[in-house]
Image: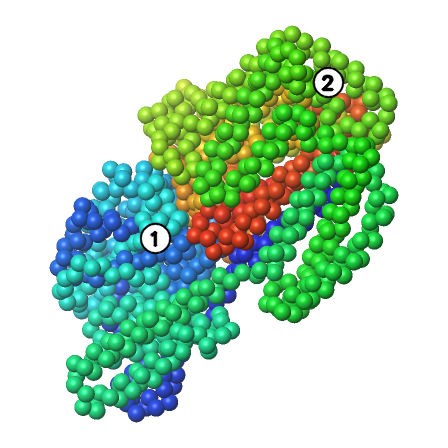
Amino acid sequence: MGLSVVYKFICMLLFYVLFLRSFFPIRNGLSGFSEHSDFSLEFFNKNATHRPDLLSALNPPIFKKMVFVLIDALRADFVFSEKSPMTSLQNLLTNGKALRYIARVHPPTVTLPRIKALMTGSIPGFVDVVLNFGSTELLEDNIIEQMRRAKKRVKFYGDEVWIKLFPHHFVESDGTTSFFVTDYTEVDNNVTRHVLPTLRTGQYDVMILHYTGLDHIGHMAGPTSPLIPPKLAEMDAIIKDIYEHVEQDKEAETLVVVSGDHGMSDQGGHGGTTQSETKVPLLLLSPKFTPHKGDVIREVDQIDVAPTLSMLLSLPIPKNNLGVVIDDALVGCSTEEKMMMLWRNGLQVTRVLEYNSKDWKMDEGYLEFQRLSKVHHDWLLSKTSGVPQSIWLSEGDRIGRQYTQAMKTMTRNISSSLTQYDIYSLVISVVTLWLILVTIAVELCLSSASYGEIYSRTVVLYIPVTLMIFFGHMMVCTTSPSSQLCHTDGTGVLLQVFILAVVCWSVKDLVVKFLQFWSVRKSKEGSCDPWGVFSPLGVVLTLGTIIHTLSLLSSSYVEEEHQTWYFYTVTIHLLILVLILCSHTSQGYFRQVCKSACNPKQTYNTYGTDYRESGQIEKQMELEKEEKHSNQVTGFPGHPLMATIFVLFLCRVLRTWNQTGNKWLDRPDVGDWLLRPENKSILSVLVGGSLTLVAMVKWAGQTYIQRSVFVVGLCCIYWYRVSTAAIDNPFQLLPTYNETRVAQLGFLFTGMCIVHPCVLLLRGSQDEGKPNTDVAVSFGGSFQSACILVVLLLGKPHNVVTFVMVVIQEHLIQRMLLHHIALSTTDVTLYYFWMGMAAFFYQECLNPASIWCKASFGEGKPKLYKKMGFSPFGMGVAGHHRADSLESFFLRQTLILSQFHLKHAKVKNFSTCYILSVIIACLMTLSTYGGPLFWLVSLVKCLTTSVESHTIHSRLKTTVEGMCRTLCWTRALPLAVYSTLVTLQRHHLFVWTVFSPKLLYEGVLTLLIAVLSIVCLCLVKFES
């Protein structure tokens, strides 16, 4: 049975990966880089040589230099509002010295995809958000690469993500980090200090400035913060200084571009599709612009920046560009030159269309472009035919507008082709996940009776099932060979064989399980006791899990999922409170119902024991133990009642400690109050008291070695917090030693917690092969201690108190509640799973409804960070949503372990980079899912503790298998339902901002639970 659970976990993960691969296809663009020869006149018209003087394929650069100012999270109303503090910039707009536009940003509105869109002109997909955690070199054709090929001197100052994307392209660079979200001053000053010296020397062709201070303020306090106007005024002064210097140096012919990478939501974050997030200002400033006035602000696409800058600087348009040249920005160009620029833009877009669409020759936009090319040629020849100049120019403007419309039509068709889904692979994945889900559900309703006879009668079903699926697969691949499951190469054939085998086996297995279930029910040899359907708590836990999954079909419930788990945890404990009370006070039928839920005689009888398997001696021992526990709880249950009330009290405190979700995200909470500098002493006392309390809670039930290792690990955590200045140094007792070494000591004692029971296991296996239940209990307790140390080390300072409250909840539940309520293995597993999901949101780690991530960035005072000269620690300031900064946080955690010194965030050795990525992923998972992981490890400890040494041979294996089977069901249910949802709603407005991120988070949680379950099953197998 254990192998069956492992098999289902592996199949579930494999088909989940297949689903993601089909739903999030990685965009394959044109390879190579554009050349000026790609836009030869031969592509224009064979008769183009009639007027070679009018058809210059390469226009001279309109501007010789450029200063690109990118202000992170600069939304449109920050600039164009009448109350905007950017007065100097508005004066330039009023005097007609700037062209103003509103750039529409394609979601996802996070930094890395937006930089790619600005520099390549392409539309990054949702996969780029995932890659945003670890941005690597951009190999796609882009403006920066074209500048390097044109021998232009490009200098960059700002967010280090540019240095990662373009590691070899800047003649000078100074990257700043985003570790300290509270640092909105020094992070910008480090950029500004380079501006005027570079302008004075003139030793540059292109200067790129990326300011992040505004974004940091937004994440801290929102767009209405009083910190916003001074920051905008600071940006305004910088732009004013740049323009004044450009205006004085007229020979340089410099263009100043001011824009935002994305906007800012009303809550201060970004990543969604609201107007405040998807509309940013785009300003082009230059003394060459003739004074003009206009109240209408034209809207363009952000991807239009790439071809426009290419034309202004006389660079080849990037190969995968989908943007359209902003024609009125082509100042100083004649109508003929503008038309040729639009033609080259259209020619480049047609090549992208040809690469991405099979029916490109029949595309409406392509046919229109071909027609316009001929009209364009005829229009050029008509200049000398006596047509009045005004009419001739008017006709040219009309053709230019038609060029623009034709390119936009092709762009829309290309964009739709880039989001084509592999429907066949999606269907196969969804169907298989549902097969696994239903099979597990049937297994949970089965007793442990032998089904060998049923299996022998139904195994023959495998042959017709296989034939039917095989012929169906052949028919689909014949009609739709584009699916990845229909490829005929070696890898594709192996993939098809494996997937079809799994599907066939899953269908057959479902039939066998269903027949077995029907046979058992018909013969009345089993029941559904593993589900606990005769227990009120079992009914609530099972139905609650199903209802929660169904609630996620609504985007609003996904965005506020934490409210569901908070309600569930409070409800289940209120029900426990009522059942405990009524079992001792009620009369008649109601009392019997309450006793059926609270009588401890049923508790251990339903923990997965099968008397036919364990024997009559074990049955007698069970009855004696049940009688012993029944005598223990005789009388008024004062301790369980007080424990339940205290658990409810902690639930109420925990839910107000950190605000999460979207609706009340900007509301102040306890964590925000504790992180204020004036409350540092209070935070210090709470952290010290919490660590002391958790040491006292974990003291009982551990060996001397386990206690010593755990307490020393807690001391290292406190020392680490003092070394990073997160809390005060009490009486200056602790030396402010290198925080790196202190953190390494914390990880060292965490590893010792895990190694200790392994040594006991190896020693016990040599003792005549007799398993000992103390070893199993030691495993659970030691892994729980290790989990506590890791979460306390990686978490924010104020969340140390939060997690200690969660530990106290678990202690009270295991010690005082579970002995007074009747829960089967399935019920206990669901109960702990609920508590784990609530703890996930208590820690304010992530919001699964969003692509944003909340992590901690920087303890202590902000410093001047330049060229990765940062302290590799700091785990504790207020919430930060930026996914593009989360990777930096875990790079610091990786440096704790590896002591690597990264220069400009580059790692030359591939194997080292791979190892770092693995470590970063592991630390990210541990930090994010620390709450659920703690409760799952506690679940293992709880179940192994309930197993008596006399019955370890049968009970331990049966209990762990029941736990893993239930966990498999809790993972198969949301994956099956949610994969169906995103498949049906793949064109929904919120598919990229709500549903898809939630699907990814569910997948990571599934991987974590699968690894934990497989490890437990392997340990039980080894122990037995």
Label 1 is placed on what type of residue? Thr
Task: Identify the residue position indicated by label 2 in the image.
Answer: 601
Residue nearest the observer in this picture, 934 or 76 = 76
Q: Is residue 373 above or below residue 293?
A: below
- Residue 847 in sight in this render: no
Residue nearest the observer in this picture, 655 or 750 = 655
Q: Is residue 89 above or below residue 53?
A: above
Q: Quadrant of residue 406?
A: bottom left
- Residue 340 in sight in this render: yes
Mark 2 or 1, which is nearer the eye?
A: 2
Residue 325 in picture, x, y percent from top left: 31, 69
Residue 803 in picture, x, y percent from top left: 51, 28
Residue drawn at x 47%, y 56% is: 987
Q: Residues within 10 Å of mark 2 (few under 14, many from 20)?
A: many
Residue 445 in picture, x, y percent from top left: 72, 36
Q: Quadrant of residue 768?
A: top right
Numbered disc 2: secondary structure: helix
Q: Residues within 10 Å of mark 1 (few under 14, many from 20)?
A: many
Numbered disc 1: secondary structure: helix
Q: Marks 2 and 1, Cα distance to the nearest angstrom? A: 61 Å
Task: Identify the residue position indicated by label 1 in the image.
Answer: 278
In the drawing, does residue 48 fall left or right of residue 537?
left
In the drawing, does residue 425 fall left or right of residue 689?
right
In the drawing, does residue 31 fall left or right of residue 50?
right
